[in-house]
């Protein structure tokens, strides 16, 4: 029998009061001398060992030269760590566990472990030792309940409005009377099996600007290109979609059947009780001053999302959509309307991938029509960059932005640059290409961007040598793990070099090879899994590892920004290990092991040396 055991940490905090009492009654204490084998590979395990004091290695014997056996250590365990879960579940140990110094352990017997797992699914899932499962459990434990309810709310869960529907042949006057009677701000007109949307604004413009008669058929002014969602879609995704499409309502369809409408104002009203959403401010801004005021509120939104435990990918999607709308709106305000069909503003790097949460720096470019004559173009784009700085988008240290003429190119020059960078594929050329292939159009004429992208994808077809050179950068930085699989004993860890970049660039290279058009790393992973180029489990683990790295970095960035006198963080990619709790350190270690395995996968796939 043991003294009282601290059950406040995962996974034991997942147990209810009765289960924790059973655990406390069942624990034994054991002492092991230095060098003593605690569990032998192939032997039955007594249960799960929780270290009170000491250090334990997990290892196996391997043949190095075909004859001699040597001990290969995978990982070390120290105070508060546990080991032996897999061995207990499987019935026999698959590795050796050896006390490297005098060690004292609690032992949870296998029989009790299995009993607790059979009655508590979360506890059982945790012992699967899967990073995706662990991260989800930790998120559930940390999440604010109100925000969790919002994040899980579905389109069909209460905000959906019953649409006002009329048939083809209904006049503008008749529709207006119906909308007034039903207090509706929109109406759907049915033409055969299709539906068209008309809003109050559409009616006003048709009568005043279009000078249509009140007796005119409503079909004449209806928009039949509807943006739709299903009742099972998340409300949060509907909000992101509206922000991206800059619309104020979506139509809800269930297997081609109309079931309702969801309005932006209703979602924002629902969401506003949880955080300060500024989407409407962006959409309604009529001047640069109003837009700047909206842009400068984004950090408050980020803080609210993070503090309420919103998943990183949701936050990324929303902030990417809002940043894109801010840039597009500013572009519309500053670029002459007669020039906009001939130019395209693209964002690149993390902004292009939709993975920038806190604003770091500008990575943007302009592609313009071959032969365009616009003498004031560079002066205008310089002003555009300056205004973005005032909006809170810092200038790029590498000067990769539209204020630099090198990043303002005709379509022909843009494709030539891509070709030249791919041909060189080292140093600065590699960096420029990696940034450019993440590009996404946000304003102007997107056809210019698509023409250049499609040409480049055809240009690279079956170029194995290029992909080998391009992928090599993913292996450039060491994974910050010790030889024994633990986190390196340092005060700080550069999570971009050690974790984020290898995943992002490795996936970028694979996506480019298979002509995946998505730029977001998570979306690229999903596409590669669908194409059979990644195993589903490997894809899920890579996505969870990347989300974990971004979340840990973001939390520490927010801490440093709050403590900073000038609101700047000079070390945005550094993780201070002392600020992580034990669970975060364990998850970080697991995530880095996934990165290490992925780098080996890339090396084998592209015949590279690790």
Image (spheres, grey):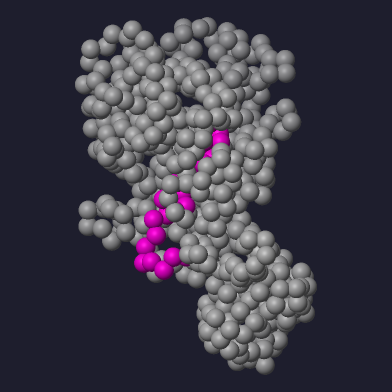
Q: Is residue 517 magenta?
A: no
Judged by its main secondary structure, the magenta piece is: helix
Out of 350 and 244, give the one closest to the viewer: 350
Q: Is residue 594 above or below residue 514?
A: below
> Where residue 321 sits in the image (x, y, percent)?
46, 36
Q: Is residue 114 above or below residue 576?
A: below
> Where residue 557 sits in the image (x, y, percent)?
36, 55
> Where residue 337 sits in the image (x, y, percent)?
34, 15
Residue span colored magenta: 487-512
> Is residue 270 among what the camera can see?
no
Q: For this view, does 210 lie left or right of residue 414?
A: right
Could you tell me which residue is drawn at 46 percent across and 7 percent down? 211
Quarter where residue 362 is shown: top left
Q: How many marks?
A: 0
Out of 526 and 269, give the one closest to the viewer: 526
Could you tell me which residue is drawn at 65 percent across and 20 percent down? 195
Q: For this view, does 574 lie left or right of residue 167?
A: left
> Where residue 398 sits in the image (x, y, percent)?
28, 37
Q: For this view, does 528 lie left or right of residue 610?
A: right
> Is residue 194 among what the camera can see?
yes
Quarter where residue 523 is shown: top right
Could you tell me which residue is drawn at 34 percent across and 34 percent down? 428
Out of 517 and 239, give the one closest to the viewer: 517
Quarter where residue 418 is shown: top left
Task: Identify the image quadrant of the N terminus.
Answer: bottom right
Q: Is residue 577 above or below residue 183?
A: below
């Amino acid at each position: 029998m043991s003294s009282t055991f601290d059950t406040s940490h995962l996974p034991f905090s997942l147990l209810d009061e009765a289960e924790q009492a059973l655990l406390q009654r069942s624990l034994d204490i054991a002492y092991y001398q230095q060098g003593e084998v605690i569990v032998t590979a192939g032997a039955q395990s007594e249960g799960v060992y929780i270290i009170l004091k000491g250090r334990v290695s997990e290892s196996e014997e391997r043949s190095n030269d075909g004859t001699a056996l040597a001990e290969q250590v995978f990982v070390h365990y120290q105070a508060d760590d546990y080991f032996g879960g897999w061995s207990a579940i499987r019935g026999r140990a698959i590795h050796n566990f050896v006390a490297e110094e005098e060690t004292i352990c609690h032992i949870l017997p296998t029989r009790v472990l299995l009993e607790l797992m059979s009655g508590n699914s979360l506890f059982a899932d945790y012992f699967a030792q899967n990073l995706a499962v662990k991260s989800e459990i930790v998120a559930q434990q940390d999440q604010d309940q109100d925000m969790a309810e919002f994040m899980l709310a579905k389109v069909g869960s209460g905000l959906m409005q019953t649409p006002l529907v009329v048939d083809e042949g209904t006049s503008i006057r008749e529709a207006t009377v119906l909308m007034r009677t039903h207090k509706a701000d929109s109406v759907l007109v049915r033409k055969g099996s299709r539906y068209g949307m008309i809003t109050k604004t559409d009616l006003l413009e048709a009568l005043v600007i279009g000078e249509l008669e009140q007796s005119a058929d409503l079909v004449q002014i209806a928009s039949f290109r509807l943006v739709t969602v299903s009742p099972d879609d998340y409300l949060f995704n509907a909000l992101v979609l509206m922000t991206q499409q800059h619309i104020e309502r979506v139509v809800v369809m269930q297997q081609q059947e109309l079931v309702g409408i969801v309005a932006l104002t209703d979602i924002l009203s629902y969401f506003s009780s949880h955080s300060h959403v500024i989407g409407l401010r962006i959409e309604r801004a009529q001047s640069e001053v109003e837009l700047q005021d909206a842009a400068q509120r984004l950090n408050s939104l980020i803080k609210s999302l993070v503090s309420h435990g919103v998943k990183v990918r949701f936050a990324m999607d929303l902030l990417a959509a809002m940043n894109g709308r801010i840039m597009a709106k500013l572009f519309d305000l500053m670029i002459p309307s007669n020039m906009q069909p001939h130019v395209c503003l693209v964002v690149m790097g993390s902004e292009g991938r939709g993975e920038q949460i806190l604003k770091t720096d500008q990575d943007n470019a302009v592609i313009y029509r071959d032969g365009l004559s616009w003498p004031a173009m560079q002066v205008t784009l310089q002003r555009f960059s300056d205004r973005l700085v005032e909006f809170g988008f810092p200038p790029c240290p590498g000067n990769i932005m539209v204020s630099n003429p090198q990043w303002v190119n005709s379509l022909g020059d843009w494709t030539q640059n891509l070709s030249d960078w791919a041909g060189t594929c080292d140093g600065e050329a590699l960096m420029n290409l990696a940034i450019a292939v993440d590009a996404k159009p946000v304003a102007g004429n997107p056809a210019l961007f698509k023409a250049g992208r499609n040409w480049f994808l055809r240009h690279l077809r079956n170029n194995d040598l290029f992909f080998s050179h391009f992928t090599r950068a993913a292996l450039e930085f060491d994974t910050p793990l010790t030889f024994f699989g633990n986190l390196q004993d340092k005060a700080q860890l550069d999570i971009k070099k050690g974790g984020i970049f290898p995943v992002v660039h490795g996936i970028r290279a694979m996506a480019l090879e298979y002509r995946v058009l998505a730029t977001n790393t998570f979306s690229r992973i999903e596409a590669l899994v669908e194409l059979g180029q990644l195993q589903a489990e490997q894809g899920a683990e890579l996505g969870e590892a990347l989300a974990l790295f971004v979340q840990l970095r973001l939390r520490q960035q927010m801490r440093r920004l709050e403590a900073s006198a000038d609101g700047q963080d000079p070390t945005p990619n550094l993780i201070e290990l002392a600020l992580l709790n034990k669970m975060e350190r364990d998850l970080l270690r697991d995530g880095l092991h996934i990165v290490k395995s992925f780098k080996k996968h890339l090396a084998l796939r592209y015949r590279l040396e690790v």
